[in-house]
Image (cartoon, grey):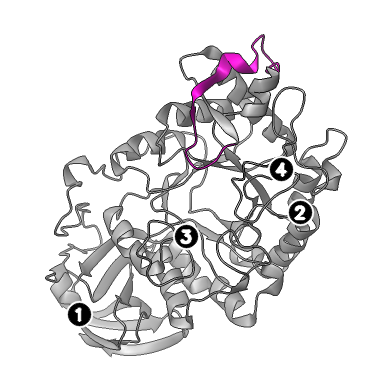
Amino acid sequence: MKTRFFAWPLALAGALTLGTGLQGDNSRSKRPNRAEISPNSAGAMPVLGATPPMGWNSWDGYGTTINEEQVKANAVWFASHLKAAGWQYVVIDMEWFVTNPTAEGNSKNSIYTLDANGRYVPAANRFPSSADGKGFKPIGDYIHSLGLKFGIHILRGIPKKAVENNSPIAGSSFRARDAADTNETCPWNPDNFGSDASRPAAQAYYDSIAALYASWGVDLIKVDCIASHPYRGDEIRMLSAAIAKSGRPIVLSLSPGPAPIEKAHEMAKYAQMWRISNDIWDLWHSPADYPQGLSDQFANVLKWAGIGKPGHWPDADMLPLGYLGPAPAWGKPRQTQLTHDEQRTLMTLWSIFPSPLMIGGDLTKADKWTESLLTNREVLAVDQHSTGSRPLLADEKSVAWIAETPAHNAYYLAAFNRTNARLELSFSPKQHGLADADYEGRDLWSHTDLPPVRSFTLRLPAHGCVLFKLRAVQSTSH
């Protein structure tokens, strides 16, 4: 494939062009631009998810097996080691209502815990504080007491067990069978029937679970089997409406991917984040659809480049870093298989894109290296506060990406080596539309300042990257 250079007029007030220019990019006519995907207007309430949400999710380390003691232990480590760097959310992933969980979940032999209104509630044998109808409120209160936010995973639809029992729907005159589409279910999970959006009972059921989660103090809901295989736009809309009725600001996260880019407007209208790929695990490359590897994500972020905006974030999936155990949802318990260079590439790509950052793994077993990756504030600032993110070039060997600082007085430059050998990459700021000037730099990973240069050669290790902050110091022309 021929190298594609992304000419970007990076004068400080320059306009953004969203088409990637990649060969084979068939989505350009359907790509929304950044302004179009924002439903917020001047004078509106503060934006929920104004920056990409940052947190921890139990999936990569515990699959569906996590219990109360483990949640609290991870939350304590999170508060002590990550909160000061801006991390916020502690999220319990799927099937917290199953009394006999397996790491990978989706078992046909699951035993469920529901309340009298057909709503899943935490399994008391795993979450003892939930007994006597308390639900997740005690855990939510505990996480909030640490200065953090609390999230949970759900599957869209209505529990089959609730339909079997024809449970009454709280706050309404409907029953579960009035809400369910018994001809539809998630193709990879047997827990629920789909919801029939043509029936008022379906909205009533979603209203009832959103009210329950709000009473628990939930701050983020990750909804699965809704953004892809299959995409369920009506259920996204109903969930968003239910959350709004609950009166609590709750981030809505849509999963799995790859979400259809032609639905970006719709997802941005109703949700704060949505997955752009299938699950990413600790591999460089995978030939299978599941799981995917780090190098496979370049094509996805290039496709979605420039679409993220405050309150609306394409999500590149979780960060499989540190110790993936004791019961990971895929594979055996292990330290991440990504090399140190690959781990920096992961953090750099997600940050320059920028994507929500959700850590996987058992935080209580995180080593100093993993902690250093997650607390590098100069790198995290790229994810949280950069603007105008855009690829400059991409081919089968390398990718280069650029963004601006919030003050629009400097640039972030990321370059990636996609090959299995060391790579040299020449870079001239002028060639890519920056001012013809000397640029002083700062290496955001090594925290070292670099002398002013007009052009430079990047020496990248296999599967490695660099992340620089560049500032013009002597401009001769524009």
Residue at 21% in and 53% down: 15
Start and end of the magenta stretch? 167-190
Mark 3 → mark 1, Cα distance in angstroms = 27 Å
Residue 21 image position (x, y, % from top left): 15, 58
What secondary structure is marked by label 2?
A: loop
Q: Residue 353 carries which label?
A: none
Q: Of the residues shown, which amino acid type is indicated by label 3?
A: Gln
**Category of crowding for the residue at label 3, using alpha-carbon neighbours closer than 10 angstroms: few (below 14), some (14–19), many (at least 20):** many
For the C terminus, give its image quadrant. Answer: bottom left
Mark 2 → mark 1, Cα distance in angstroms = 56 Å
Mark 3 → mark 2, Cα distance in angstroms = 31 Å
Mark 2 / mark 1, whichever is N-terminal: 2
The answer to which quarter of the image holds residue 444 is: bottom left
Q: Of the residues shown, which amino acid type is indicated by label 1?
A: Ala
Residue marked by disc 1: 437
The answer to whether residue 452 is seen in the rendering is yes
Residue marked by disc 2: 67
Q: Nearer the viewer, mark 4 or mark 1?
A: 4
Q: Of the residues shown, which amino acid type is indicated by label 2?
A: Asn
Q: Residue 384 carries which label?
A: 3
